[in-house]
Amino acid sequence: MLDIRLRSFAAAAILLAIAAGAWLLSADPAAKGLVFSLLTGAGLGVVLQRSRFCFLCNLRDFLDERDPRGVLAILVALGFGAILYSVVVMSWVPVPQPGRLPPNAHIGPVGPVLAVASFVFGLGMAISGSCLSAHFYRLGEGSATSPFAIVGAAVGFLLGFLTWNPLYLWSISESPALWLPHFLGHAGSLTLTLLIVGLLGILVHVLANWADWTAATAGPSNPLKAILVDRWPPVAAGLLVGTLSAIFYFRVAPLGVTAELGSLVRTGASGIGLLPGTLLGLDTLRGCATVVKQALLSNNGILVVGLVAGSLASALAADQFRPRRPTARQIARSVFGGLLLGWGAMTSLGCTVGVLLSGIHAGAVSGWVFLVFCTLGAWSGLRAPVLRRLAK
Amino acid sequence: MKRIAKLTSVLVGLFLASGAQASDALVTADWVQDNLANPNVRIFEVSVDTGVYERGHIPGAVHLDWHTDLVDPVKRDIADQAAFEAMLREAGVSRDTTVVLYGDNNNWFAAWGAWVFDVYGIEAKLLDGGRKLWEAQGLPLDTALVDHADSLIELPERNTALRARLNDVLDASEGRSAAKLVDIRSNDEYTGKVFAPEGVKELAVRAGHVPGAVNVPWGKIVKEDGTFKSADEIKAIYAEQGIDGSSPVITYCRIGERSSHTWFALKRILGYDARNYDGSWTEYGNAVGVPVVNVAGTVWTGK
């Protein structure tokens, strides 16, 4: 355990470094996207770390312990983000016209490939221990396994690029990008989204074992401890994640954490001639875009850097920075799970943040498909005996 | 005496008119700021990067999507008359509206827009320096969409004198017309070292340029901050290449959008008889049997 003064000093130094980075970047008026990305990333890192906003852990807590807190945080994030998103989308696209989608919104192609890729992503979550966004914030907690999962995901991305063309020709090229407001209008789309989120909330409430968790979360706490050390309450976490998602969409692009990783792999692999000359249609689809890199700093890259740094500062302050030496088995599991995460994220054009969160916020059917199949994948990974042994 | 006075006034009027035309093609950021509330001024943003307009545009500006509003989305052509007229009506443009265009990417696509407007009989102006300069000066941006009252404008048929087709280019190249050709691409594209600029797909199967074309890369006529150089400087740059307005000019690039930028300078700033060849190298470099000068000798898919 690190000395509290050392930890506090280190956390403050990291936050100062983030602020200094933002200040340096702001000297270039063309880089305002980078400044906003760095600060949003840092904010997201703090929120994810403080509230343990990890799709898999929250699902596992609910399945194993009937602890509803994390799952509720996700549902609040989905619903509140959808409300804020609709404010932005309605002002940009007042009338949903056929053939036109809100700019940049992650409204991906819906078809069997998305279902399979989301399922594989969910499986990868269960095996590697979390989804990609959580692996990034866990880097900040000094996780021993997340670096291996991220390396595995990079390899998975490469496999995704290699299998892309046949999958595109077989199905993705004919998979429509379904946007709920095209069918229901803005109001209908938002109502349906909130209705589903509400019903899921009721389901969670009914199945939850509230007695255990009301006791655990009740009671007055030192406010400083409540902010810096205790896990943030689910409603606060959900509201903050939903807010960050919408303001980032408003200012820069939909939230996502895999575009930079994918771009690095794509740039490197095409540089050494590993990839096909053309990735069919990939650059025309909505989602976490992986582009061949032209500039060192990208909005998404700096968002992820901010996320890891924010999480590190927050983990240090909470004394949750606990690096450990991983076992060989843990490493193997992380790499293999990461590989599935990478293939799934490349093929479905994003992950739990880019497709699920940003998609559902925007009214994309692809977000809901990802939610269903990723949850099924994770559930299978956690419950199916063979896979369970693998994940142990 | 009376006759002389009349003649003088006509001459002065002509002089003023041509002077006004030369300087009127461009407006400054200050002018735009002063005219934000002017109901007779309609500003259009033509940016190609998705979401740029929505995340902040010049207050009151209307969005023109290059991929759908300024071109025919199915066949390779500029927007058809009915679609363009409908768009202008919805934007509330009437005959006495002053149209100002600006956009990202050095105003390339805004200049394409200005060319399309001109083809349909509306002399649009460009905000000199485009979006980049507006942002660099820290001028206000807005995310609200303004619903302008519809107009009843009727557009004339296309003015074909502003557009060059493949045959016009061949006539110029082979001496059947007096027109001169300007290739505004980079020197590496012009000499045939590369088929397309870096980061852009090679969409032509031959490299090089149209025989007889001179090479004046588009960037030569703009300043560091993206604004056009003075009319005199632009005139001198072209005069060096033998283009002085005494014969018609045809501009081309790869797909016709950067050449609109040069077309704008030649036609609207200098007042030369200039046409844009929007087929450009992606048509010419793929056409069968047309002569090509390929100094570098690059062979398509050759080793």
Image (cartoon, rainbow, N blue to C red):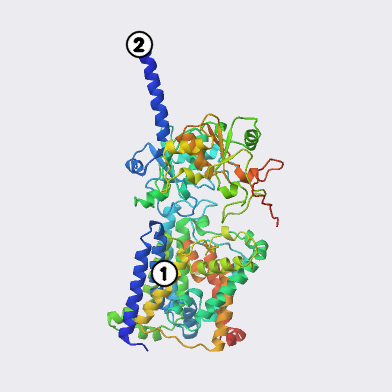
| Left or right position of A290 against B135 | right
At a point 41% along the width and 65% down the height, the residue shown is: A37
Mark identifier at residue B224: none
Amino acid bearing label 1:
Gly
Output the chain of dot 2.
B
What's the residue type where badge 2 is placed? Answer: Lys
Q: Quick check: marks 2 and 1 in contact, CB under 8 Å?
A: no
Kindly report which numbered mark, 2 or 1, lies closer to the viewer in this rendering: 2
Q: Which residue is at the far top?
A: B1
A295 or A330: nearer the viewer: A295
Quadrant showing the N terminus of chain B: top left
Q: Secondary structure at mark 2?
A: helix
Residue B259's place in the image compared with B10, above or below, is below
Direction front: furthest residue? B240
- Find disc 2 in the rendering and name its residue: B2
Q: Identify the image quadrant of residue B4.
A: top left
From what the image shows, is residue B215 above or below residue A134? above
Q: Which residue is mark 1?
A: A41
